[in-house]
Image: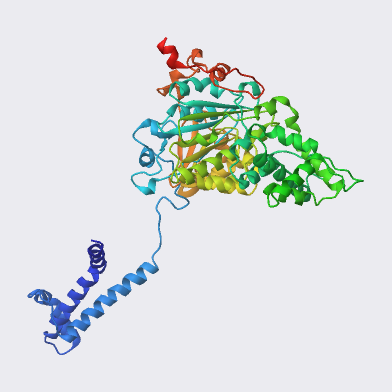
Amino acid sequence: MAQAADMKKLILLNFPYIIAFYMVEKAAWLYRHCNGDSVVDRLMVLFMNFGLAYKSFLPSFHPFDLLIGLVGAAALKAVIYFKGKNAKKYRQGEEYGSARWGNQKDIEPFIDPVFENNVILTQTERLMMSGRPKHPKYARNKNVIVIGGSGSGKTRFYVKPNLMQMPQKVSYVVTDPKGTIIIECGKMLSDAGYKIKVLNTINFKKSMRYNPFHYIRSEKDILKLVNTIIANTKGDGEKSGEDFWIKAERLLYCALIGYIWYEAPEEEQNFSTLLEFINASEAREDDETFKNAVDELFEELEQKKPEHFAVRQYKKYKLAAGKTAKSILISCGARLAPFDIAELRDLMAYDEMELDLLGDRRTALFVIISDTDDTFNFVVSIMYTQLFNLLCDRADDQCGGQLKYHVRLLLDEFANIGLIPKFDKLIATIRSREISASIILQSQSQLKTIYKDAAETIIGNCDTMLFLGGKESSTLKEISETLGKETIDLYNTSDTRGQSPSFGTTYQKTGKELMSRDELSVMDGSKCILQLRGVRPFLSDKFDITKHKRYKELSDFDKKNAFDVERYLKHELRLRMDEEFDCYEVNLSEESTA
């Protein structure tokens, strides 16, 4: 089939040269049979009787005729080649740029016919959730950059509409500044069969428990946890910002967490135990031989298991002299100072989040953070780091490379979450595991402030960008440049008055930004700009949340739909470590007989 198609293409490409060969060859045959005293006379006879050449449609096989035919075909080939090489390239109406706004025809191939199976972007544009469309060229990842200044409606026009979609096999992880989204949307999700999880760093009493130690599966997970702690907390001790001290802290954390994970009972595997280890560590400047309680524990462990991970890390830490070790301990104490708060220790004493099961069932995890105070945002950063790693590992090891349920992360106020280590690499690889992230910012500069050079990589791995409005200069500049230029007609008139008055009109073309920075800054509040990779940009209306069929299930529509978080948490079985329970054995068979 492919060979036949190639042969057909070859014949079509060479058809003009075959015709040229045939016509010139027939003319050569006629020329040989024309009488005349000179070449000119014979050519005159040829032109006057040219029709005789086709009296027989069969070609001549005389060597002279064949040679002249080949020369004619070669001449045509040469003319076409040089003509094409030196041809002027005209793009009528696109001399200064071809940018234009997209339309319904442009977005149509990217929309799933079933409304719920789409990512809602604007009132008229959506993106199918399926990663395998009918035509592979329409495949796009579901990573979205949402940019909008304060009050532009990032929650109302993007987060809530996408929560209302609730496709059959999708779980949600939602960053919830101030804790309002769970109140407004929680009941709708719960009624639809979603298992609700809450991590509240504003009011710990309204939060489920989260213990990072619960998700340590190997020594590499210990290293990831330590790196996240260091990246998102400050060690305010002497020289804490210098590289040597950071490395020394890392050794101590790895040793202590390794000991806790390997040797401590499960109920003691938490940050409270880590803090007790730090408090029990003591270094004396004037006595290098002094051994504290932690030293003795590690010596005992070394005798049993000399190659133990924790022992190897601790021995490297102990290479520091007494004065140096004291500085390291001060920095560690300052870094873990938030854990001196009893409520935080209680929050992270054990685990109820079940992060590793988000891709196995319909779950909605709400991560409530303060938009004014970042004191406890390191907890959120640790949680997100573990979440990405857990889901990727589960997809690879237990689900054949893809999670059973697509996990959508709606990361509102992304700049306040903190630094997620290697996020630029994670966002490039999560697509194949059925994970997607919507990064919601007030400006692009926020991303660059946190992730530095990696910010461009993160943006590049988001096929969709949604601009809801704003005034930040660098953001407006980048969006305007990305939209490109269109070619417009310029109409000039001139009117000269005096002794010799004259009037003139000229028409010409020029280039203009599809939307300049000043136009972007004063864009109508009901409008937004959507850019999808490989498609013309769209200037559209923001999604009207009241038109969604599930709007009546939100507390926006009826206050009775407000989700009572405290009441929900009371119905969850939560066994606290400091509570005592009476257990009774009941013989049901005897009871039924009686």
- Residue at the limit of the structure toward the left, as seen here: 55
Horizontally, residue 453 falls left or right of residue 539, namely right
Where does the image place residue 545, in percent across and percent down from the top left? Answer: 46, 24
> Which of 578 and 383 lies nearest the eye of the viewer?
578
Where does the image place residue 254, in percent across and percent down from the top left? Answer: 70, 45
> Above or below — where is 585 with respect to 257?
above
How many circles with numbers are drawn on the protein?
0
Where does the image place residue 110, in percent across and percent down from the top left? Answer: 38, 40
> Which of 340 and 198 lies nearest the eye of the viewer?
340
Horizontally, residue 107 falls left or right of residue 359, namely left
Asked which quadrant contains residue 198, the reply is top right
> Residue placed at 37% from the left, 48% from the top?
136
Horizontally, residue 569 falls left or right of residue 589, namely right
Horizontally, residue 247 falls left or right of residue 533, namely right
Where does the image place residue 151, in percent across and percent down from the top left? Answer: 58, 27
> Which of 581 and 196 lies nearest the eye of the viewer?
581
| Visible residue check, residue 497 | no
